Structure formats: C-alpha cells, structure tokens
Image: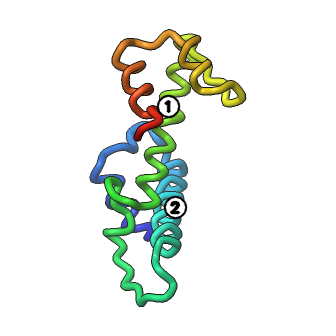
C-alpha cells in the first residue's frame, strides 16, 4: 500500500516542497487510510477482493478521498480566518450565515445546501 500510495501521489505531483521524511509520512498516512477504509466499507458477510489501485483512488469513495476532502475543508477555514471570517461551531449555522460577509454565490450555495426540503 505504501508503494501504491507513493506512486499515485508522485503522479499527481502534490509533494513539491516536502522533505523526504514528510513525503514518507504522507505516503504512509495515505496508504493506511486507503487500506483501512477499503476494509471497513466491505460487507463482512461477503467475500472481498482487495484492489490496491481502487482503494487509493483520490476521486472515489476511498480513505484518501476523505483525507483530501478534510484537508480542503481545513484550508477553506484557514483562508476564511485570514479574511476575518471565523466559524463558531457553537453558534447556530443560520446565525453564522447572517453575521458572515459572504459573496452572493457563496451565500446561495450555503442556503441551497441547508434548505429544509432537500
């Protein structure tokens, strides 16, 4: 899994600026997430055929995709904080939306995501 994670990550070219130690740590985290998630999502009552390439896909229902999504969300929060937008998980979302200066498209997207009828 570590070799597969390294191959896939190098192909994507997302490791520039990382030291060798950081790269190896990243490969280990991606590989282990891929393996664990693949096993956890399998139906325990059915036979499973493990496919390393399928388990490490960055665009599917996989551990690495969840890691990528989490990282993107954290990046959005960091950038928002730089812009003075602080998300308070203790406050109700609608209050946060009312108080947060959002662009029109951002507000529309959030309102669409939190509509009651969806």
Q: Which residue is identified by label 1?
A: 75
Determine contact: label 2, label 1, CB under 8 Å.
no
Report how many numbered discs are placed on residues in the image. Answer: 2
Secondary structure of the residue carrying numbered label 2? helix
Rendered position, 66 above or below 118: below
At x 47%, y 71%, the residue is 41
Rendered position, 83 above or below 76: above
Q: Quadrant of residue 93?
A: top right
Toward the left, the furthest residue is 11
| Residue 1 appears left or right of 11 | right
Q: Which residue is identified by label 2?
A: 28
Q: Nearer the viewer, residue 36 or 109?
A: 109
Q: Quadrant of the N terminus?
A: bottom left
Which label's residue is closer to the chain start, 2 or 1? 2
Secondary structure of the residue carrying numbered label 1? helix
At x 52%, y 19%, the residue is 80
Residue 106 x/y as whole percent: 39, 20
Residue 113 x/y as whole percent: 42, 34
Which circle, 2 or 1, is nearer the viewer? 1
At x 47%, y 33%, the residue is 114
Q: Quadrant of residue 38?
A: bottom left
At x 54%, y 34%, the residue is 74
Q: Nearer the viewer, residue 15 or 21?
A: 15
Residue 31 x/y as whole percent: 47, 64
Toward the right, the furthest residue is 90
Q: Residues within 10 Å of mark 1 (few under 14, many from 20)?
A: few
């Amino acid at each position: 899994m570590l070799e597969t994670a390294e191959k896939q990550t190098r192909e994507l070219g997302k490791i520039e600026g990382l030291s060798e130690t950081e790269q190896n740590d990243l490969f280990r985290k991606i590989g282990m997430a891929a393996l664990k998630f693949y096993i956890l999502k399998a139906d325990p009552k059915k036979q499973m055929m493990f496919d390393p390439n399928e388990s490490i896909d960055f665009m599917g229902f996989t551990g690495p995709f969840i890691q990528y999504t989490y990282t993107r969300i954290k990046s959005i929060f960091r950038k928002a904080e730089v812009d003075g937008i602080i998300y308070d998980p203790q406050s109700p979302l609608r209050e946060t939306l009312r108080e947060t200066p959002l662009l029109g498209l951002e507000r529309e997207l959030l309102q669409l995501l939190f509509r009651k009828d969806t």
